[in-house]
Amino acid sequence: MHPHQKTVLPKRIILVRHGESQGNLDTAAYTTTPDHEIQLTQQGIAQARLAGDKLRQIVSGGDSSPDWRLYFYVSPYHRTRSTLREIGRSFSKKRVLGVREECRIREQDFGNFQVQERMKVIKETRERFGRFYYRFPEGESAADVFDRVSNFLESLWRDIDMNRLHLDTKQDLNLVIVSHGLTSRVFLMKWFKWTVQQFEHLNNPGNCEIRVMQLGSGGDYSLAVHHSDEELLEWGLSPEMIADQKWRANADRGAWNDHCPWYLDEFFDRLPDHSDDDTAA
């Protein structure tokens, strides 16, 4: 944007996992159908329609402006595109600023057709090796997904900063990312600077589960504005991570949480508050 223009931040960034798929119902589907062509079940379609209703309640409720809008980013996989199509039934054309298919938020690549017995052995190996770093043969690791999601986030910020989404300053913008379970967890890991160890304890969202990052009073995003402590615990956040989310709900944008251990203290045995060398500073 022009240097004298103020960047308008989305009120919410909302992550939605796809509805129940044929692969969720029976992993044998992956042996004959490419992952990107796996379709929703009838239950998944119903879940997606319900998610649309829930999304509408979220973006239109509370202190939202009556003139709210949505912009969607969607994984190119069949099940995510179908989920978005059903979600869209809850909104008029006026409310949707646009939609973009985004390959960088696709599912983790598990390696072409997936033979059940072979995948069982591979996933057992992954548990021993570590879920974040283990790379599937002919596929990706969660670390690989982290890299492309990080790249997507840079583009997302440019879209916001340069107002490529054509947002009117009087409107509340809600960015909705329709993606996959691991991709959503990696997105939150990158955004909130969670460590690999913290990622390993996160639970996958359920089909069509909605996770809302909302602007707090100081201009920072937090999961604790919309979600309860109980929900965050169910997702696998530790008490320290939840405390940080509560701090973010009222913190100024760009502020530093001195009480957040993984920002500094976790990486050192002990750092003194002061030293003799500090007197000259």
Image: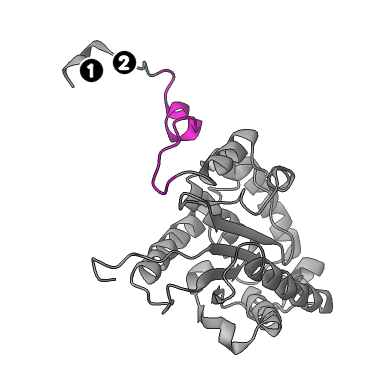
Q: Amino acid at mark 2?
A: His
Horizontal side of residue 179 vs 160, given as left or right:
right
Pinpoint residue 106: horizontal percent, then vertical percent: 55, 69
Q: Are marks 2 and 1 in contact (CB under 8 Å)?
A: yes
First to last magenta residue range: 252-270
Residue drawn at the location 64% of the way across and 37% of the way down: 238
Is 12 magenta? The answer is no
Q: What residue is shown with label 1?
A: 278
Q: Amino acid at mark 1?
A: Asp
What colour scheme was applied to this rendering of the protein?
A: one colour
Pinpoint residue 158: horizontal percent, then vertical percent: 35, 68
Q: Quadrant of the C terminus?
A: top left
Q: What residue is shown with label 2?
A: 274
**Secondary structure beneath label 1:** helix
Q: Quadrant of the N terminus?
A: bottom left
- Determine the CA span between mark 2 and mark 1: 6 Å
Residue drawn at the location 45% of the way across and 62% of the way down: 148
